Image: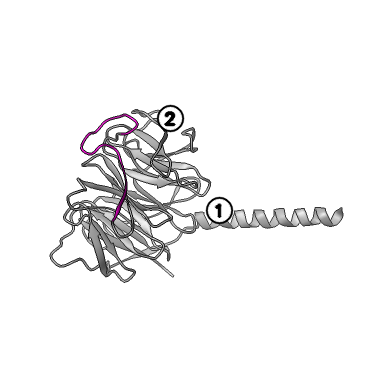
Amino acid sequence: MNLHRTYRVFVFTIAMMLLTAERSSAGDKIDFEPVASMIQLPEGLTLGPCSAVDFDSKGRMYLFHRGKQPILCFDRSGNFIRSWGDNLIGQAHGLRVDRHDNVWVTDVGQHMVFQFSPEGKLLLALGQSGKPGNSVDQFNKPTDVAFGPEGEIYVSDGYGNSRVMKFAANGKYLGQWGEPGKGPGQFNLPHSIVIDGKGRVLVGDRENDRVQIFDTEGNLLEVWPGFAPYGMEYDSKGRLFVADGRANKVLQLNPAGKVVNSWGKKGNGSGEYDLPHMLAADAAGNLFIAEIGGRRLQTLQRKK
């Protein structure tokens, strides 16, 4: 009996140590330095406003921009692999890669959400092309997507409808929450959305200068005010970074939603920003920032 009790205490102690280490890692203040982007564009292509970027499990980068060949794919070294989206994408906005390496984008021009294979094959289309609305099969300028642990798809339907919509992995409508306003659970342009390690849904409520945190059914849990969350991204260690397009900064938040570090200022130089829109972290923890005003992709490299 005493041996059994000792074993339980040991297991509990180890579990608490791991949890404490995870929380500490997620809250650790880290630092970056700006470095030149290594991507090599296809001949004759000039980047338009860059709206989003992400990586798949093989280290391939997908960059979404407002111009010809709107979805660009590069290898680990920045070499161009392929592009797609001409004659389909109306106006680039959000891009995320799911755990199966499928590429999801939100199109604020056509009011659509698209799912593609890594090779650019269209797998799923949600919404009605060119027809904004507020029904369960319509969007009005959707901004971003996030993925739940069971493959659920969360869409921040931001510019027109001020809501979050939830779908099954096959695109079946499951529910929604939110309405225009400044109160708890209301939105003034839900612009970015991510799922944290606890399965909570973080929504970047851009024009209300806050992040609102919900459970998977839309019940409000927390509110983090004080910045404009244009884009949000967790790295592999659970650290949360925010692209604040209003302040022209990249922010690091601790698990309580407080800013613990920031980088950048308004400008066109390296490490300066002109409307940083959305961002992604690679496997090494480096940050990549898609810039609307500057029409470029910038890199923040982790300091050793």
**What is the crowding at mark 2: few (fewer than 14 residues within 10 Å), some, or many (at least 20)?**
few
- The alpha-carbon separation of the residues under discs 1 and 2 comes to 26 Å
Q: Is residue 65 left or right of residue 226?
A: left
Magenta-drawn stretch contains 128: yes
- Work out whether mark 1 precedes mark 2 in sequence or the reverse, and give the earlier one: 1
Q: Mostly what secondary structure, the magenta segment?
A: loop
Q: Position of residue 40 (x, y in %)?
A: 23, 68
In the picture shown, does residue 297 fall above or below 159? below
Q: What segment carries the magenta color?
A: 121-137
Q: Is residue 159 left or right of residue 87?
A: right
Q: Which residue is mark 1?
A: 23
Q: Is residue 2 left or right of residue 112?
A: right
Q: Residue furthest right?
A: 1
In the picture shown, does residue 249 fall above or below 39? above
Q: Amino acid at mark 1?
A: Arg
Of the pair 166 and 23, the residue shown nearer to us? 166
Of the pair 76 and 119, the residue shown nearer to us? 119
Badge number at residue 184: 2
Colouring used for the render: one colour
Where on the picture, by quarter, is residue 175? top left
Of the pair 142 and 294, the residue shown nearer to us? 142
Q: Amino acid at mark 2?
A: Pro
Secondary structure of the residue carrying tag 2 is loop
Q: Residue at x 29, y 38 (%)?
A: 127
Q: Are the residues at dot 1 and dot 2 in contact (C-beta closer than 8 Å)?
A: no
Point out the image quarter for the C terminus. bottom left
Q: Position of residue 184 (x, y in %)?
A: 43, 30
Q: Position of residue 33 (x, y in %)?
A: 35, 65
Where on the picture, by quarter, is residue 297? bottom left
Secondary structure of the residue carrying tag 1 is helix
Q: Position of residue 209 (x, y in %)?
A: 35, 39
